[in-house]
Image (spheres, rainbow, N blue to C red):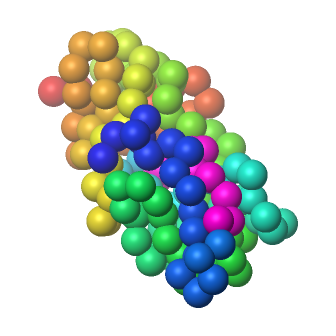
Amino acid sequence: MLFSDARNHPVMTTDTASTIGKLSALIVDPTIGQVLALRLRKTTGPGDTLHWEDLTAFGPDAVTIPTAAAVTSARDRAAELDDKAAELIGKRVLTDTGNDLGAVADIDFDPASGTIISLVTPGGPVYGDRLRGCGSYAVIVTDT
């Protein structure tokens, strides 16, 4: 699923069918090529982070969670990555040998597992298994 297709998905509880917020960003751990959490906006509670393991499902039209209590503050590895890795869209993609592959236009990820399939760039896809790191300016990938 492309992140551009998932952005603004409502996040709904399965216990009360309430809308808790809307998906605004992915918190990605580039060292394992995995979505760790979702950042939400327009949340009804104090938190704005939904950790991947707390999802019930990531469907084509909505994200479901068991209860509103699943939306919290970022914790563990997601908290470490939160500021620099939450939004990959627009960041430069640089290889570990210094080649600029363009900016991230979109992120293709598996909605069942959160695995990053590829970063979509103007020059074509950069596969998720090439991810190595992410900072405030750029995403680092291995050269092919």
Residue 127 visible here: yes
Q: Which residues are magenta?
A: 19-29
Vertical placement of residue 5 versus 59, above or below:
above
Magenta span: chief secondary structure = strand
Residue situated furthest front in the rendering? 17
Q: Would you say residue 21 sits in the magenta stretch?
A: yes
* Residue 71 placement, left or right of 87: right
- The image quadrant that residue 60 belongs to is bottom left
Q: Position of residue 9 (x, y in %)?
A: 52, 51
Residue sitting at x 59%, y 87%? 15
Q: Nearer the viewer, residue 3 or 31?
A: 3
Residue positioned 51% across, 24% down in the render: 91
**Residue 144 placement: quadrant:** top left
Q: Can residue 77 be seen here?
A: no
Is 10 inside the magenta-drawn segment?
no
Along the line of sight, the residue nearer the viewer: 139 or 11: 11
Compared across the picture, whether 16 is left or right of 52 comes to right
Q: Position of residue 68 (x, y in %)?
A: 68, 77
Residue situated in front as seen by the camera: 64 or 36: 64
Provide residue 85's location: percent of width, then percent of height: 56, 42
Q: Is residue 77 above or below residue 24?
A: below
Residue at (28, 55) in percent of width and height: 110
Picture coordinates of residue 88 (x, y %)? 50, 34
Work out whether 111 lies above or below 120.
below
Q: Residue furthest right?
A: 46
